[in-house]
Image (tube, coloured by chain):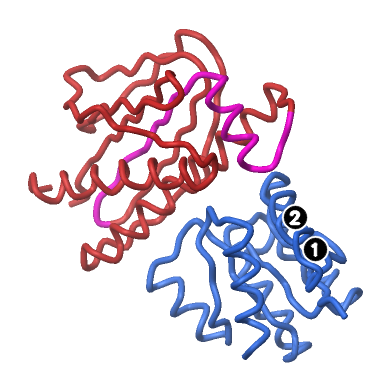
Amino acid sequence: MDKNTEIQVIQSFIRSMCNVFSTLTEKKLVPRGVEQSDTLVVKVSGVVVIVSFSGLFSGRLLVSMPKELTGIIYKGLGGENPSDDDLLLAANEFGNMVAGNAVTEINNIIKGANIRLSPPSSFIGDDLVFFNFKMSAHNILLDAENLTIRLNVALREEK
Amino acid sequence: MSKKVLVVDDSPLVRNLIKKALAQSSDFSVVGEASNGKEAVELAQKLNPDIITMDVTMPVMDGLEAAKAVLSKDKNVKVLLLSAMGDEDLLSQAAKIGIRHALQKPFKAEQLIDALKKLLEE
């Protein structure tokens, strides 16, 4: 994948995160910057949602956020007093919307991309470790309400 | 008289969100909800809704299949497609089965109500 396309794809995910978050919560999410990950391993704590996608290129979106921020998203989805199971539901829905919005933009601007999503998977825990197998990844930190969301986008070109 | 709405989405959170949004308008009342396309087809026959809000990606039967089945039995029911995806390919698949209205998730309550009102004007 050429560098310009990679940047376009990453920016679509960032824009989508910010738009989906603010539509649901009416709060602003501010990205700090993009850094290429130099390790194959992603270590996170809190609530995590993973959405895979494939088409012209494949990859996966990983969003990790503190329980408190996930609770704000859950409230934005119309719920109150969430249990851990409710937070997982909210994370699933959030991940689906972020990925869906990003992939819609990507499919509309990159001819022939034809990217399709897999259903999301969500996790809760401390010191969770995920492995990027044969994919290059980018880390983006985004801030809201003095809390931080971590977005990790891994991509691989399909031959 | 308020229009009868059947809410179809595999996420209980989204179904709740839609019900809360429609509760803000006296033009619509939710008469049932389904968590997959098969349930949607069965409930549509039973409840005769005026409008169906239909998610696309669902287990058992997806929203496009369900909409096709419902519209084959009742051409008067209006379907609003709701999806996190909104690319041209999906919209063209929807248009082939007679669905011309879609709203991308997430949406605010007023956006949903506006979309349903536009659907009814058709």
x then y, percent, for residue B38? 76, 65
Q: Is residue A28 magenta?
A: no
- Amino acid tagged 2: Ser
- Colour red belongs to chain: A
Looking at the image, residue A127 sits to the left or right of residue A142; the answer is right
Which of the chains bears the disc numbered 2?
B
Q: How many discs mark residues in the rendered view?
A: 2
Visual hue assigned to chain B:
blue
What secondary structure is marked by label 1? helix
Which region shows up in magenta?
Answer: A56-80
User: Which of A120 and A13 lies nearest the eye of the viewer?
Assistant: A13
Q: Name the residue under label 1.
A: B39
Looking at the image, residue B58 sits to the left or right of residue B106; the answer is right
Q: Name the residue under label 2.
A: B35
Residues at circles 2 and 1 in contact by the CB criterion of under 8 Å: yes
Looking at the image, residue B35 sits to the left or right of residue A92; the answer is right
x then y, percent, for residue B48? 86, 79
x then y, percent, for residue A83? 72, 23
